[in-house]
């Protein structure tokens, strides 16, 4: 019974995605729009592409901890590229989580609100290297925006972040990493000393379809805790009138010795604003 509200949210969210995909497929597309969808799908595999996008990533996790808790997290993740000069771009990425969880830390009840935000800035060359490597480096910031102690760390944090990838035909292979140390905040809360690591591989298909496999690993060094998920999602670029978007859905397989779930899935809706 305690998962009923979360399941209702999950069903509603996924039905919206399915409706959007069906609405697209009942309308015919010309070859030009298909080519545009293919190009956008490929750009979406590149975290430092020159593409303005606003992803809404819904993560649904069940069977968390000793009380069989559940969590829904909606990550609002705007990505804004800016041209610095003829050779360099600056790509700003924000992750603002909106979370509803129940009994995640034992019989801790329900918490709903904002979790901590992460802001990253990547300085990236506009052209790949001679070997085809696309890369970016910069700072990552942890901002304590959580509205409940059980939704965040209570700490400001800072550290480096980097991304590197290669796109060979329709295949993209790469990784994203950051490390954050807390530098200020609530003295009564535990310090943050954590590494996030996300290797990924994606295969694009004609018509704006793609399959992506990644793993998202967080290593909390002071707590000696590792938590992660393997995510396998199918996606498609769609058109809603003049608005381009992408929809994606797939399972999440958890692992690690942290406060991991038993199972979950991911559903994503991305607004696209190509230049």
Image (cartoon, rainbow, N blue to C red):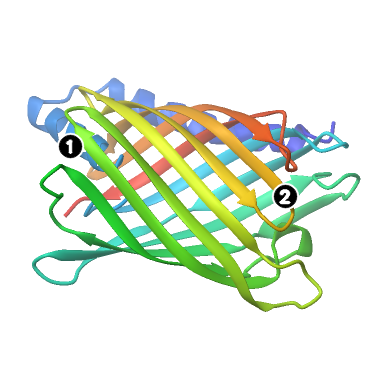
| Mark closer to the chain start, 1 or 2 | 1
Residue holding disc 2: 224
Instruction: Report the residue marked by disc 1.
Output: 39
The kind of secondary structure element at disc 2 is loop
Q: Which of 141 and 221 is in front in this view?
A: 221
Name above or below for residue 56 compared with residue 210: below
Q: In which quarter of the image is the N terminus?
A: top right
Q: How many labels does the image show?
A: 2
- Give the Cα separation between the discs numbered 1 and 2: 42 Å
Give the residue drawn at x 72%, y 55%: 112
- Asked whether, in this view, residue 16 is left or right of residue 87, the answer is right
Q: What element carries label 1?
A: helix
Give the image quarter of residue 199. Answer: top left
In the image, which disc is placed on residue 141? none
Q: In which quarter of the image is residue 241?
A: top left
- Direction from residue 63 to residue 252 in the image, left or right: left
Examine the rendered structure and indicate whether residue 202 appears above or below residue 228: above
Where is 202 relative to 187, above or below? Answer: above
Q: Do the residues labelled 1 and 2 touch (CB within 8 Å)?
A: no
- Coordinates of residue 100 in the picture (x, y in percent): 70, 49
Position in image of residue 197 (x %, y %): 49, 46
Q: Which residue is drawn at 83% across and 33% down?
A: 68
Looking at the picture, tell me which residue is in the foreground, 159 or 65.
159
Residue at image location 46% in from the left, 43% down from the top: 198
Is 141 positioned to the left or the right of 200 in the image? Answer: right
Viewport quadrant of the C terminus: bottom left
């Amino acid at each position: 019974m305690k998962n009923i509200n979360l399941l209702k949210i999950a069903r509603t969210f996924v039905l919206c995605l399915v409706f959007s995909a069906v609405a697209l497929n009942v309308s015919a597309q010309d070859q030009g729009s298909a080519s545009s969808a293919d190009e956008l799908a490929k750009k979406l595999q590149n975290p430092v592409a020159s593409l303005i996008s606003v992803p809404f990533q819904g993560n649904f996790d069940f069977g968390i901890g000793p009380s069989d808790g559940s969590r829904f997290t909606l990550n609002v993740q705007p990505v804004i590229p800016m041209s610095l000069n003829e050779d360099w771009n600056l790509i700003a990425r924000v992750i603002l989580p909106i979370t509803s969880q129940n009994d995640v830390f034992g019989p801790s009840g329900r918490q709903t609100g904002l979790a901590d935000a992460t802001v990253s800035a990547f300085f990236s060359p506009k052209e790949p290297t001679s070997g085809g490597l696309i890369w970016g480096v910069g700072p990552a910031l942890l901002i304590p925006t959580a509205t409940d102690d059980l939704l965040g760390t209570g700490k400001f944090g800072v550290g480096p972040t980097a991304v590197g990838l290669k796109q060979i035909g329709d295949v993209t292979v790469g990784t994203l990493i950051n490390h954050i140390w807390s530098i200020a905040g609530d003295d009564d809360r535990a310090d943050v000393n954590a590494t996030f690591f996300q290797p990924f591989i994606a295969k694009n298909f004609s018509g704006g379809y793609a399959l992506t496999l990644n793993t998202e690993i967080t290593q909390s060094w002071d707590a000696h805790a590792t938590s992660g998920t393997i995510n396998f999602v199918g996606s498609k670029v769609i058109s809603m009138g003049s608005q381009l978007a992408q929809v994606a859905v797939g399972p999440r397989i958890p692992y690690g010795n942290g406060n991991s779930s038993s199972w979950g899935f991911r559903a994503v809706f991305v607004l696209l604003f190509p230049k």
